[in-house]
Amino acid sequence: METETPAYKRIVLKLSGEAMQERGGRDNISPPVVREIAARIKEVNDLGVQTSVVIGGGNIWRGLAASHRGMDRTTADYMGMLATVINALALRSTLERMDVETRVQTAIEMKNVAEPFILGRAIRHLELGRVVIFAAGTGNPYFSTDTTAALRASEIRADVILKATKVDGVYDRDPNTDANAKRYERITFSEALAKRLQVMDSTAFSLCMDNKIPIVVFDVNNPTNIRDAVLGRKVGTLVCDDTTAPENPKQ
């Protein structure tokens, strides 16, 4: 049987906190859902892909939303960073039960819980085949986990950011409100900027564009999408620099 060759050697998988929940469920973290996500990560890691994860905390706490309700923004954002650590620990525990060596590195030091983020150590873990989960955002308020994903991808020199979302790609209009919305299979950074498409927040998008890190935006609920994206198949939307993307993605 022919072995499939990954299109990327080192990836950052960006997950929202809501990815840890069941649809319509009451639990902030659903163990069956986390097991499903962990199984998909293990599948990719088993291909020999150096896999890192950035996870949000919106299933537990949203700092920006709390600040709009009167809470101090800095305090609210730090609370959100702690929420991402909770999600990271849940994912790490599940991965390790599947015999996947995993490390959580946090931007806010908490020695009894996880390692501090140290670039050289993170890269070494990846080279040894361990999954690395980056938690606590950038360690600073006013920055999203999208920005964290873009920053960590730049630092570790990742080949791609895989952004798992609730929709199956980037559209020219909101597909939830407009049945005629068009999904892009591939679009350049400059085109996405000109069309004001909401791929990531502006800080994250600028980092990716400046460092020529392609972004694949896809539906997290399709169980094959992460593997297919890693193998270079057509999944969701590829956002890229003109000179960095593969010309003919696999079918």
Image (cartoon, rainbow, N blue to C red):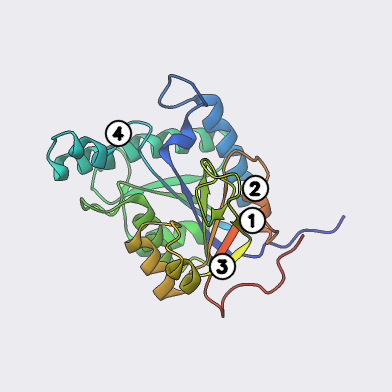
Q: Looking at the image, which residue sits at the far top? A: 26
Looking at the rendered image, the quarter that the N terminus falls into is bottom right
Q: Nearer the viewer, mark 3 or mark 1?
A: 3
Q: Secondary structure at mark 2?
A: helix
Q: Earlier in the sequence, mark 4 or mark 1?
A: 4
| Mark 3–mark 1 CB contact (< 8 Å) | no
Residue located 68% across and 44% down the image? 224
- For mark 2, what is the residue? 225
Residues packed near mark 2 inside 10 Å, few (<14), some (14 to 19) or many (20 plus): many
- For mark 3, what is the residue? 187
Question: Taking the image as drawn, is residue 58 in sight?
Answer: yes
Look at label 1 and name its amino acid: Ala
Marking on residue 61: 4
Q: Residue 81: image x %, image y %?
A: 27, 42
Q: Earlier in the sequence, mark 4 or mark 3?
A: 4
Cα separation, mark 1 vs mark 2, equals 6 Å
Task: Describe residue 151's horizontal placement relative to residue 167 as left or right.
Answer: left
Q: Earlier in the sequence, mark 3 or mark 2?
A: 3
Q: Secondary structure at mark 3?
A: strand
Cα separation, mark 3 vs mark 2, equals 19 Å
Look at label 2 and name its amino acid: Asn
| Mark 4–mark 3 CB contact (< 8 Å) | no
Q: Residue 139: image x %, image y %?
A: 24, 52
Look at label 4 and name its amino acid: Trp
Q: Residue 41: image x %, image y %?
A: 58, 45
Residue located 47% across and 33% down the image? 20
Foreground pick, 129 / 4? 4
Residues packed near mark 4 inside 10 Å, few (<14), some (14 to 19) or many (20 plus): many
Marking on residue 229: 1
